[in-house]
């Protein structure tokens, strides 16, 4: 990202909206450009890389569930933030190796640090884990509050959105457990 070009674009936006708050907005274009560069670091990451190091597991490792993963993203439609939490679960096949737990969080973070819609983050996370680790099944639940729903348009400040992305196969009782853990972390 060319910070100077991005700052100039923000200046043009403020000028087009007739906004000039003197000292308060004098450096706003540069601040906004730096902020977006920081928020959108995910374009420089390949989430697949996080899943390359694996470890031995018991013959039948059961479910691996990580709940309470912070989700901080930017709405692709309105450039406003949305914040929430995710739960990622996968079921390794018998005899498969497992990935380090921090890697599941890193995959979520890398996809979230892009212009996004919530549904796509979950889908990308589930597909990435499925393609790299080849487990029996993957689930990614995300619950988030969207500033575009709170601050503009419908202006519904209490609305939360939950999405569920799956890949492969899991038993109904496993999905119920994952959902319960997801809800309890909130």
Image: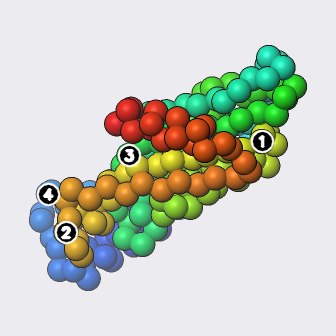
Q: Position of residue 66 (x, y in %)?
A: 55, 31
Which circle, 1 or 2, is nearer the viewer? 1
Spatial CA distance of label 3 from label 4 is 34 Å
Q: CA distance from mark 2 to mark 3?
A: 18 Å
Q: Which numbered disc, 3 or 1, marks the residue closer to the eye?
A: 1
Q: Nearer the viewer, residue 7 or 178?
A: 178
What is the spatial separation of the Cα atoms under label 2 and label 4, in whole angstroms? 31 Å
Whichever of callouts 3 and 1 sits on the residue coming sooner in the sequence is 3
In the rendered image, is residue 101 in sight? yes
**For the residues carrying marks 2 and 4, which lies nearer the camera in this image?**
2
Q: Which residue is mark 1?
A: 136
**What numbered label is drawn on residue 155?**
2
Task: Report how many numbered discs are placed on residues in the image.
Answer: 4
* Left or right, residue 181 beside residue 21: right
Residue 167 on image: x %, y %: 70, 52
Earlier in the chain: of badge 1 and badge 2, it is 1
Residue hosting label 4: 23
Label 3: which residue?
84
- The part of the image, by quadrant, that contains residue 92 is top right
SS class of the residue under badge 3? Answer: strand
Contact check, label 3 and label 1, Cβ < 8 Å: no
Q: CA distance from mark 1 to mark 2?
A: 41 Å
Mark 4 vs mark 1, foreground winner is 1
């Amino acid at each position: 990202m060319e910070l100077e070009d991005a700052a100039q674009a923000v200046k043009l936006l403020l000028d087009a909206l007739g906004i000039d708050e003197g000292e308060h907005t004098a450096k706003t274009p540069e601040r906004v450009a730096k902020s977006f560069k920081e928020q959108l670091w995910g374009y420089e990451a390949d989430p697949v890389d996080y899943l390359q190091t694996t470890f031995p597991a018991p013959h039948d490792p059961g479910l691996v569930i990580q709940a309470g993963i912070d989700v901080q993203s930017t709405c692709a439609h309105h450039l406003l933030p949305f914040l929430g939490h995710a739960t990622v679960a996968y079921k390794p096949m018998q005899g498969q190796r497992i990935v380090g737990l921090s890697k599941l969080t890193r995959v979520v973070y890398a996809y979230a640090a892009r212009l996004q819609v919530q549904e796509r983050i979950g889908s990308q996370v589930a597909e990435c884990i499925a393609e790299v680790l080849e487990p029996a099944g993957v689930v990614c639940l995300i619950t988030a509050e969207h500033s575009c729903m709170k601050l503009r348009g419908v202006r519904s400040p209490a609305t939360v959105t939950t999405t569920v992305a799956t890949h492969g196969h899991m038993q109904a009782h496993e999905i119920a457990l994952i959902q319960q853990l997801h809800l309890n972390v909130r």
